[in-house]
Image (spheres, rainbow, N blue to C red):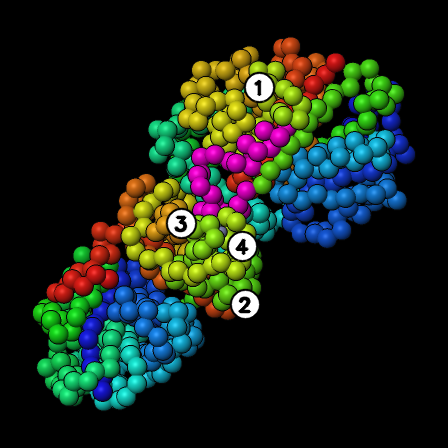
């Protein structure tokens, strides 16, 4: 038996302004990925495979992306994003045997009207993820069959969406036992979202072959670094050789936290100053900031800044990082982390479990 | 190249050339591979060994260094060093592609940076550490445009005021349009011979006293600091030690001002200003043509232009004129020792060479 121990909800910035969200760097995978990594946060050390059940319409990356994001063997199953499917998935996983599981649901705005107004309460560009862990307890919540549990989830997401009405990003992570929030009025049904991504039009980008992109995902998505036992220095991004002493047999992998970064330098790239693969983004949403961010162990990473007006982030500001779309290449989106101001990225909601 | 041969006081021609080095990025992709053979064809040098040197914007400085080694080894009595880039005959999208190929692709480019953006980060950090230097950056642009106005080979002949520089649209905060060098076509060539043979060609040769070079991490995120280019520092250290010069021996500098902030960094990296002191030194007028240490009397990359492979060689062209007193209206009075500083990308490669006359 498993039971739901934790829930994370994520509503992107500008969720009440659907045109802004549609022009942003989010898609159903980044929404789900953010909810999944936050609900899993702090549990990275546990061995064994994890089952991820994803509900909604996703790009192909969903088949392998969670494994790269969590850095562990992952079995992905999928079903359509409806309330009844969500209840069914939770019920089956609660009753089943095996290791930890995550159920993540994303319900994008272009799905059917009936789904948008469903009792799941996760209509629109919101994601909610449930972490289920094995339990010896004879009395799991059996959430899937439990009407009260179902309405609590709906209330959780409604509350997040209501807080997001001001345009800020909302994220909260809560231990399930402590309850998941109170309800508020549901958002109006959003307009249909333009997801014509023009994936094939960019050909003038500096070329990173897909194989190399995949090879470097551990550093790009999980900030994988290496600590050298010989000289005690850290190498980031990972390059399987110590950048200080050159040894290759003395390295221990370590993941740098994806939050708690500090801005070392920041610039605003104006229209015309962007690499060609960002042309569509600039045409759609204008200039953007890029920051050099200091992570743990003094390691630094260059990240595009998102969810904030360009020109507002300053040296010394604290940032969190989230998985977002970077640019299209060879018919698919390349994903990576972007920096977001920490003031709106903090864990909010009824149970302030550190994200 | 004809100009290089024509400038030899007692004459030289293609048949005297025993080896050549070609500095070019290959902008536009017209002949990415085996560009050396294409140069031999175009220059009437078919049969002569030619080596293409590609270190992005520092290709010219590194080509000179390779040529110096060839000459010093005694293998070649007359070596041609030429740099060339044709940048204006491609579409806007291809131009922007090629402007970005020499930066770090994996992290900087995928975050949305071109070189303007990377130098924007550098300037941001410089301001954070040393205070707002906008006025000094504007002075760099204004001074170099003023010098360029006197250089018939410069891309821009128009003077700009500090106020104009400060009022221009921003490209990569805090850098604006006038903080950036233009996209230019250009070529430069020089002939190098062993000192003992030089007097066969001229009574006033310019001597290459040293050629240092260095490298650093491609991406600035892996460097311990943004406001110092260690490759420049290393190259200068090697050059000055090899030549046995002091900084005070130098009459003027040709530095790599691809963006105005780069000229401030160069003054500090090369040892002519203490960290954080370059803005004050610049605003004092010391780096103007009539100042204590003139910098970029030819207009620099900023006004002369920055045809990538040609830039490092064209700096030596200016030094050749200045040290022989042939720089006309922009002549630096009493110039007898000079330094050329050529940077690839945002400090990933750098070459520093020292020259003297008489
Ligand atoms: Zn080591």
Instruction: Mark 4 and ligand 1: say if the CB distance to the nearest ligand atom is below 8 Å.
Output: yes
For label 3, the SS is loop
Location of residue A45 in the rendering, given as x and y in whole percent from the top left corner: 33, 69
What residue is shown at x 47% (from left), y 68% (from top)? A332
Between the C-alphas of marks 2 and 1, the distance is: 49 Å
A231 sits left or right of B192 in the view:
left
Q: Which residue is mark 2?
A: A211
Using the numbered discs, state the Cα–Cα distance from disc 2 to disc 3 in whole angstroms.
25 Å
Judging by the rendered image, the residue that carries numbered circle 4 is A247
The numbered mark 4 sits on a residue in which chain? A
Q: Is residue B228 magenta?
A: yes
For residue B46, above or below residue A108: above
Task: Please tell me whether mark 2 sits on a helix, a strand or a loop.
Answer: helix
Range shown magenta? B216-239
Towards the viewer: A41 or A275? A41
Residue B49's place in the image compared with A21, above or below, is above
Dot 3 or dot 4: first in sequence order is 4
Q: Examine the structure image and report whether residue A155 is included in the region drawn in magenta.
A: no
Q: In this figure, which residue is indicated by the disc labeled 3? A: A299
Q: In this view of the protein, which residue sits in the foreground, A258 or A323?
A: A258
Q: Please report the residue visible at 18 percent of the width from the left and 57 percent of the height from the top.
A: A166
As drawn, B9 above or below A201: above
Report x, y in % for residue B168.
42, 32
Q: Is mark 1 within 8 Å of ligand 1?
A: no
Residue B296: percent from left, percent from top: 58, 23
Graded by Cα atoms within 10 Å as few (under 14), some (14 to 19) or many (20 or more), the crowding at tag 2 reads few
Viewer-closest of B201 and A97: A97
Q: Secondary structure under badge 1?
A: helix
* Mark closer to the observer (4, 1): 4
């Amino acid at each position: 038996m498993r039971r739901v121990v934790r829930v994370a909800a994520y509503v992107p910035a500008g969720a009440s302004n659907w045109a802004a969200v549609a022009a942003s760097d989010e898609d159903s995978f980044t929404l789900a990925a953010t909810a999944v990594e936050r609900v899993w946060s702090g549990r990275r050390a546990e061995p064994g495979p994890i089952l991820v059940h994803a509900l909604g319409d996703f790009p192909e990356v969903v088949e392998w992306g969670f494994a790269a994001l969590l850095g562990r063997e992952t079995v992905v199953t999928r079903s359509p994003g409806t309330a009844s499917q969500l209840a069914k998935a939770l019920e089956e996983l609660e009753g089943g045997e095996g290791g930890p599981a995550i159920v993540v649901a994303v319900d994008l705005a272009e799905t059917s009207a009936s789904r948008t107004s469903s009792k799941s309460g996760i209509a629109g560009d919101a994601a909610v993820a449930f972490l289920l862990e094995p339990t010896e307890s004879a009395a799991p919540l059996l959430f899937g069959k439990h009407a009260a549990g179902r309405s609590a989830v709906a209330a959780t997401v409604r509350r997040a969406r209501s807080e997001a009405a001001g345009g800020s990003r909302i994220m909260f992570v809560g231990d399930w036992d402590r309850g998941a929030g109170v309800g508020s009025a549901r958002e109006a049904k959003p307009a249909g979202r333009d997801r014509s991504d023009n994936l094939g039009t960019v050909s003038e980008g500096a070329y990173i072959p897909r194989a190399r992109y995949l090879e470097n995902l551990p550093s790009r998505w999980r900030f994988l670094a290496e600590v050298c036992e010989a000289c005690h220095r850290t190498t980031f991004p990972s390059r399987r050789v110590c950048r200080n002493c050159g040894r290759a047999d003395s390295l221990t992998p370590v993941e740098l936290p994806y939050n708690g970064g500090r801005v070392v330098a920041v610039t605003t790239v104006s229209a015309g100053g962007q690499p060609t693969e960002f042309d569509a983004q600039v045409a759609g949403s204008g200039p953007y900031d890029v920051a050099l961010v200091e992570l743990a162990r003094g390691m630094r990473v260059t990240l595009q800044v998102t969810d904030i007006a360009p020109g507002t982030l300053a040296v010394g500001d604290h940032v969190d990082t989230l998985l977002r779309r970077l640019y299209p290449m060879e018919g698919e989106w390349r994903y990576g982390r972007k920096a977001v101001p920490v003031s709106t990225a903090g864990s909010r909601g009824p149970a302030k479990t550190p994200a | 190249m004809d100009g290089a041969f024509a400038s030899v006081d007692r004459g030289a021609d293609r048949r005297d050339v025993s080896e050549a080095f070609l500095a070019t990025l290959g902008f536009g992709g017209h002949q990415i591979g085996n560009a050396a053979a294409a140069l031999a064809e175009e220059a009437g040098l078919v049969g002569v060994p030619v080596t293409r040197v590609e270190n992005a914007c520092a290709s010219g400085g590194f080509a000179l260094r390779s040529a110096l080694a060839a000459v010093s080894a005694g293998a070649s009595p007359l070596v041609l060093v030429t740099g060339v880039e044709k940048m204006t005959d491609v579409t806007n999208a291809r131009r922007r592609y090629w402007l970005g190929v020499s930066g770090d692709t994996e992290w900087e480019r995928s975050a949305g940076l071109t070189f303007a953006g990377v130098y924007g980060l550098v300037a941001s950090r410089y301001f954070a550490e040393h205070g707002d230097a906008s006025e000094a950056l504007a002075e760099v642009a204004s001074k170099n445009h003023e010098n360029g106005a006197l250089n018939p080979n410069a891309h821009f002949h128009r003077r700009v005021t500090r106020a104009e520089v400060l009022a221009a649209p921003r490209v990569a905060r805090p850098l604006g349009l006038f903080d950036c060098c233009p996209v230019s076509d250009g070529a430069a060539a020089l002939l190098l011979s062993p000192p003992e043979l030089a007097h066969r060609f001229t009574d006033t040769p310019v001597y290459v006293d040293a050629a240092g070079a260095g490298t650093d991490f491609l991406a600035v995120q892996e460097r311990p600091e943004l406001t110092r280019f260690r490759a420049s520092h290393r190259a200068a250290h090697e050059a000055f030690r090899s030549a046995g010069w002091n900084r005070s021996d130098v009459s003027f500098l040709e530095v790599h001002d691809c963006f105005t902030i780069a000229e401030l960094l160069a003054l500090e990296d090369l040892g002519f200003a203490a960290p954080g002191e370059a803005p004050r030194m610049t605003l004092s007028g010391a780096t103007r043509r009539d100042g204590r240490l003139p910098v970029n009397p030819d207009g620099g990359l900023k006004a002369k232009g920055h045809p990538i492979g040609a830039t490092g060689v064209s700096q030596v062209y200016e030094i050749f004129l200045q040290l022989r007193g042939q720089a006309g209206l922009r002549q630096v009075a009493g110039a007898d020792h000079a330094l050329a500083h050529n940077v690839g990308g945002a400090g990933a490669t750098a070459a520093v060479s020292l020259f003297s006359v008489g």
